[in-house]
Amino acid sequence: MSKKKNEELKKKLSYENKNGWDLSHSSKDKVFKFSEKYKEFIGKCKTERETVNFVFDEFEKKKKKEDITVINRGKNIALIRLGSENGMKLIASHIDAPRIDIKQKPLFEETDIALLHTHYYGGIKKYQWFNIPLAIHGVVVKENGEKTDITIGEDDRDPVFVIPDLLPHLSHKVIDEKKVKEAFDAEKMNLIVGSIPFDKDEKDAVKLNILNILYEKYGIKEEDFISSELEIVPALKPRDIGFDRGFIAAYAQDDRICAYCSKEAFFDAKRNAKTVVALMIDKEEIGSDGNTGAKSRFLMDVVIEILKAQNRDVTFESIGEFFKNSEVLSADVNGAVNPMYKEVHEKDNASYINKGVVMTKFTGHGGKYMANDASAEFVGKIRKIFNEADVNWQTGELGKVDEGGGGTIAKYLASWNMDVIDCGPALLSMHSPYEISSKTDLYETYKAYKAFFEG
Ligand code: MN
Ligand code: MN
């Protein structure tokens, strides 16, 4: 056979991933414009509560006649566009992110420095959180039940906070010679919050000064910390990366990049006969437990609200029927191949930056333990939707077999007897304080979600 014929055959039969920047249909201007709006969102929404508030405000502005919303405890939100058919097309993302929480009795003084005890949340590499500017976001519930919102460290005129690292000159024994996993003691991750004494003869005068400032500024007393949820997050603004500005660095792109794309897709999608839902879940990073996590009853409450709004009977059977007729994208990110650590991936089944939104058939670890393994039929259906909508997509496995692994909310959603597949962009430096995404992958994720809602 001639070389030309071989080439033709290869083109016809082989499968190859494409770089999003090479594709004509996603023009660079459109992608960059979309990215600017995303950067605004990701810079503003640094906690699950802030994300719910932001999304709800936008919903109120953009909602159509057939749209309803359900909020759970300020930490979950479901955007719902009612259709006539039974079942839903659901895109479920999570809006919690790895961070550092403040303990319930946090404030203490040591060597004339006021500090807060902390307890980290989710899978962090502890060393990444030392000596970077940090902000405090959250709520304090006072004794009278009044709730005070606190955000400090984001405005350029605000102070920031720092967990101090040890100087290299003296860290040989206590840090450098240990294994990384053991070198950084979580109980040493205390946050500097002050250094000026209230009065020179007072014991713990720096702590007293901080208490006084907190009382004057927010009206909160020491005991109020016990009923608070204060989250320490990077005080870093989203920025473009590279001379060509192709990447975005920002905190908590896992998984608010998917939450953002699902909300944009929800507002932009053409109407479907099926009900479409963009659902944002909490507590994914710590195992999906609790009354705002994916294992909670909240999803069933959403379905009950839909059935009621559709004037359908709400029975055990009708809820089951509704779930059975539903299709789900578990919208979560994947770990892109880091060029310096290619060895943790198997190159043919890894996900790559710029190669589009990633479909992950299964997550889990070892012999597919703890995995939602999407069926061939469902993968086929989603693949067809994406291809017909010209979405740039790839498949991806999270690392080599037996290298490690991880889970998403997919398996909890699937336990309701819905078809579920993981689908989201691949990030570099996932779970770090400054995660990296690709602008073309961001845009293809939005396109994929929109196509799913419309398909
Ligand atoms: Mn995630
Ligand atoms: Mn995660």
Image (spheres, rainbow, N blue to C red):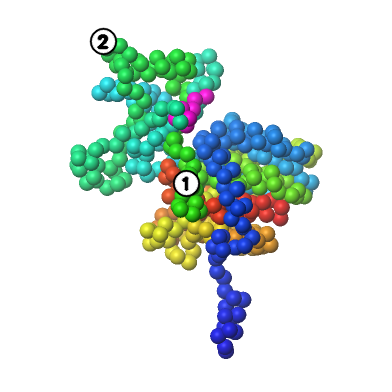
Label disc, if present, on residue 194 of the rendered structure: none
Say whether residue 130 is magenta: no
Quarter of the picture containing the C terminus is bottom right
Left or right of 114 in this view: 274:
right
Left or right of 388 in this view: 43:
left
Residue beneath disc 2: 201
Q: Which of 87 and 176 is in front in this view?
A: 176
Vertical relation: 227 (above or below) 317? above
Left or right of 23 in this view: 406:
left
Type of amino acid under label 1: Ala
Q: Nearer the viewer, residue 283 or 37?
A: 37
Q: Residue at x 65, y 36 (%)?
A: 58
Callout 1 secondary element = strand
Label disc, if present, on residue 249 of the rendered structure: 1
Callout 2 secondary element = loop
Foreground disc of the pair 2, 1: 1
Type of amino acid under label 2: Asp
Badge 1 residue CB within 8 Å of ligand 2: no
Residue bounds of the magenta highlight: 149-155
Residue 259 visible in the current orientation: no
Image quadrant assignment for residue 391: bottom right
x, y percentage for residue 337? Answer: 44, 58
Distance of mark 2 from mark 1, alpha carbons? Answer: 47 Å
Say whether residue 153 is magenta: yes
Q: Which residue is drawn at 60% across and 32% down?
A: 53
Left or right of 422 in this view: 367:
left
